[in-house]
């Protein structure tokens, strides 16, 4: 790791997904709008260890890979990993291979080769640029293993009870009686004590939400359905041209994708933790068919963080990943960003968990919700306040969104979450879009 | 193998074929050719991902083999399929001729001539060739698994026939519009490049290159308008493909410069959403062209 004081790796930061940025400062080409770095535009302070420029041969004059180059590039890859780019060993080898074809002495060659081989998505690009600038700016890691100290600010209530206090207290904790759980089940999580909320979270961790299926284009052998020409003819061939038995096939089913957008703004903070734990249960059950984003002042994809099996670890990672805890909500703009990124609302069940306190323009939210409802298979809105008696969806955001929602549900208690799980499961809820349309 | 010595040289060669690549893209292509690695291109729709594969094919004078991905794409459509009706015919003919030697019949049935080569097999068999796996994000994740298998060692095993191996791996270009996260294992095999919208100067140059009858003034006006459209709050900002179409439409109508009336009349060539067209006309984005 580079010096902990170096800005890039210590503060990996989070950029908006789907938004690539320009190459590092100084690498930019001429003029406004020219966002492509020039060949030989210098990167300030770019310096390779002396003698390294000649260490790698060209294709015409191949040379064995220099040990120092290897250690410099592995160090670079380690810096990237610390910043959240999945630059693994195989990728680093690819980089070394690529460098053999290019000129190591030229910063831009190294820049591009690293970008092509070590990055795997637009989210990686800003981090890559920052790390590249920092790493080749003289703040290079000493070759050798060292550990980063990552400071994680905790924003969630009762986060570390899970693994620290959790283990100790587990033995002493009196087991919850069924009737006590029944009482908790319908209580609003915002009005619970930390211990009660922990209990609800433990119950959420046990949840195995089934997923509604969709018909795939692929076929599987079946006893009835359409005639399977291929297998029938194969069977016929095997029997020397005698059609003995007809084979059938039918469409396979696959889990329908669920996309969760969880509002983590200030007004939602009593519920954000529980909502994220529910999201964790969904991701754990169907890791390939679930996407989770948090919204607030910016859109953050947290699916990767939630893939940890242990809820405590997953929540800690998510907590560190979200840059905008307890801010305001600009749901309309973020929804637009989400839709523009093509992040797969198409054909999915989209669940938005928010109280609809929109800071931005409600008409923008309305427009984006209209688009969303045309793309998604189903739009579910979870509003924790809906659970309280006498709630009326009067906020501007809620008013704008309502016409485009299929299911408007509460998300304030364990029971409400269980109902939501049923909604996402195979059992079909009522007719689509009853609100209006 | 290729007489392209450096990325700069590749820029020139591509330019000769009317494709203006920037340095990053040229380096990526250069490495893909030299390392025999697939090139994984992501970016907004219409930034020239597919066009690049076509141009590389022309440059190398190799056939372009295209595999358009869609949900439910499977091995029978991507790799190979047996021509069952013809096999059956062969069997009947053999029966009529009184041939009953089972081993011989089987050998004849699973002959190469009854094998229908789909794009992936065709790319492995054809040398040299350029394989374009277009919009891989549309295929489902099972498909990625076997795509990865083929791209790892460019060989295809057919149980009845044996293994078919490419002596020289085809040049592979994979494109994605990022509607879905493509599996990491596949990306790791590839050189990843994110394509941006072109800069103003480049866009003007591309328009002039593609449409030689287009004047410098018109190209500059269109590129400036396109830049403004991309910054506006639109559902689908236009890519370079749309700007070329738009300019072509304007030229067809005999436009010398981009006046608001003609621009509005040809707006359908550049904006494909009704909301976008309305927003642009309402905000007068075309007026100060």
Image (spheres, rainbow, N blue to C red):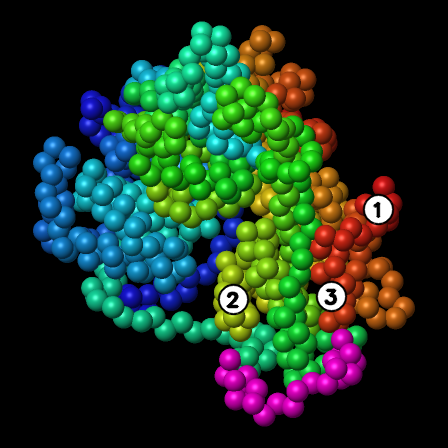
The residue lying at 52 percent from left, 89 percent from top is: A168
Where's residue A294, x and y in %?
60, 59
Under tag 1, what secondary structure?
A: loop
Where's residue A386, x and y in %?
82, 65
Mark 1 or mark 3: which comes first in sequence?
Answer: 3
- The residue lying toward the viewer, choosing from B210 and A203, is A203
* Residue at which label 1 appears: A431
Whether residue A275 is situated above or below residue A426 in the rendered picture? below
In the rendered image, which quarter is residue B255 located in? top right
| Residue A168 colored in magenta in the image | yes
Are the numbered discs 1 and 3 placed on the same chain, yes or no?
yes
Stretch in magenta: A163-185
Are the numbered discs 1 and 2 placed on the same chain, yes or no?
yes
- The chain containing the residue under callout 3 comes to A
* Residue at which label 2 appears: A309
Mark 3–mark 2 Cα distance, whole angstroms, equals 20 Å
The image's mark for residue A418 is: 3
Q: Is residue B187 left or right of residue A284?
A: left
């Amino acid at each position: 790791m580079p010096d902990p004081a170096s800005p890039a790796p210590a503060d990996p930061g989070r950029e908006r997904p789907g938004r690539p940025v320009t190459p590092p400062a100084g690498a930019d080409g001429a003029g406004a709008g020219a966002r492509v770095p020039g060949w030989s535009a210098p990167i300030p302070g770019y310096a390779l260890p002396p003698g390294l420029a000649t260490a790698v041969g060209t294709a015409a004059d191949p040379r064995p890979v220099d040990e120092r180059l290897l250690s410099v590039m592995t160090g670079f890859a380690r810096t990237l990993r610390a910043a959240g780019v999945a630059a693994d060993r195989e990728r680093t080898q690819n980089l070394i291979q690529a460098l053999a074809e290019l000129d190591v002495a030229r910063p831009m060659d190294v820049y591009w080769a690293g970008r092509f081989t070590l990055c795997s998505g637009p989210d990686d690009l800003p981090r890559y640029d920052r790390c590249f600038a920092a790493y080749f700016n003289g703040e290079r890691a000493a070759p050798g293993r060292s550990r980063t100290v990552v400071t994680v600010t905790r924003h969630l209530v009762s986060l570390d009870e899970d693994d620290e206090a959790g283990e100790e207290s587990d033995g002493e904790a009196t087991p919850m009686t069924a009737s006590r759980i029944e009482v908790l089940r319908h209580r609003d999580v915002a009005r619970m004590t930390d211990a009660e909320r922990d209990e609800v979270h433990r119950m959420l961790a046990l949840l195995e939400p089934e997923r509604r299926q969709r018909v795939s284009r692929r076929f599987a052998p079946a006893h009835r359905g359409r005639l399977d020409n291929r297998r029938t003819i194969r069977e016929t061939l095997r029997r020397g041209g005698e059609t003995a038995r007809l084979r059938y096939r039918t469409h396979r089913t696959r889990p329908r994708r669920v996309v969760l957008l969880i509002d983590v703004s200030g007004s939602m903070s009593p519920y954000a933790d529980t909502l994220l734990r529910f999201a964790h249960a969904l991701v754990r059950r169907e890791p390939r068919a679930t996407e989770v984003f948090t919204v607030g002042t910016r859109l953050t994809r947290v699916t990767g963080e939630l893939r940890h099996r242990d809820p405590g670890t997953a929540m800690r990672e998510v907590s560190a990943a979200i840059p905008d805890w307890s801010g305001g909500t600009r749901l309309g703009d973020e929804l637009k960003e989400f839709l523009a990124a093509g992040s797969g609302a198409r054909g999915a069940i989209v669940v938005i968990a928010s109280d609809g306190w929109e800071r931005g323009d409600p008409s923008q939210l309305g427009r984006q919700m209209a688009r969303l409802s045309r793309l998604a298979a189903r739009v579910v809105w979870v509003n924790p306040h809906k659970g309280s008696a006498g709630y009326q969806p009067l906020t501007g955001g809620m008013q704008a969104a309502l016409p485009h929602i299929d299911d408007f549900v509460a998300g304030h208690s364990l029971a409400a979450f269980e109902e939501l799980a049923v909604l996402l499961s195979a059992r079909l809820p009522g007719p689509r879009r009853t609100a209006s349309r | 193998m290729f007489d392209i010595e450096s990325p700069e040289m590749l820029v020139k060669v591509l330019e000769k074929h009317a494709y203006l690549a920037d340095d990053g893209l040229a380096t990526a292509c250069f490495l893909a050719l030299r390392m025999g690695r697939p090139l994984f291109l992501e970016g907004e729709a219409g930034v020239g991902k597919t066009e690049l594969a076509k141009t590389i094919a022309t440059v190398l004078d190799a056939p372009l083999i295209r595999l358009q991905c869609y949900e439910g794409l499977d091995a029978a459509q991507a790799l190979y399929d047996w021509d069952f009706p013809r096999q059956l015919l062969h069997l009947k003919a053999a029966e009529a001729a009184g041939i009953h030697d089972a081993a011989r019949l089987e050998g004849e049935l699973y002959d190469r001539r009854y094998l229908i080569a789909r794009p992936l097999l065709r790319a492995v068999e054809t040398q040299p060739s350029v394989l374009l796996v277009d919009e891989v994000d549309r295929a489902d994740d099972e498909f990625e698994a076997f795509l990865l298998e083929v791209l790892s060692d460019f060989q295809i095993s057919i149980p009845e026939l044996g293994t078919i191996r490419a002596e020289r791996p085809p040049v592979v270009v994979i494109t994605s519009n990022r509607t879905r996260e493509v599996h990491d294992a596949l990306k790791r095999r590839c050189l990843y490049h994110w394509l941006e919208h072109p800069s103003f100067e480049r866009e003007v140059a591309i328009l002039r290159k593609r449409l030689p009858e287009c004047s410098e003034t018109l190209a500059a006006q269109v590129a400036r308008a396109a830049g403004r459209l991309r910054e506006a709050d639109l559902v689908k900002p236009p890519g370079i493909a749309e700007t070329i179409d738009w300019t072509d439409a304007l030229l067809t109508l005999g436009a010398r410069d981009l006046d608001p009336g003609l621009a509005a009349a040809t707006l359908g060539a550049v904006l494909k959403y009704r909301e976008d067209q309305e927003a642009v006309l309402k905000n007068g984005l075309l007026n100060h062209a």
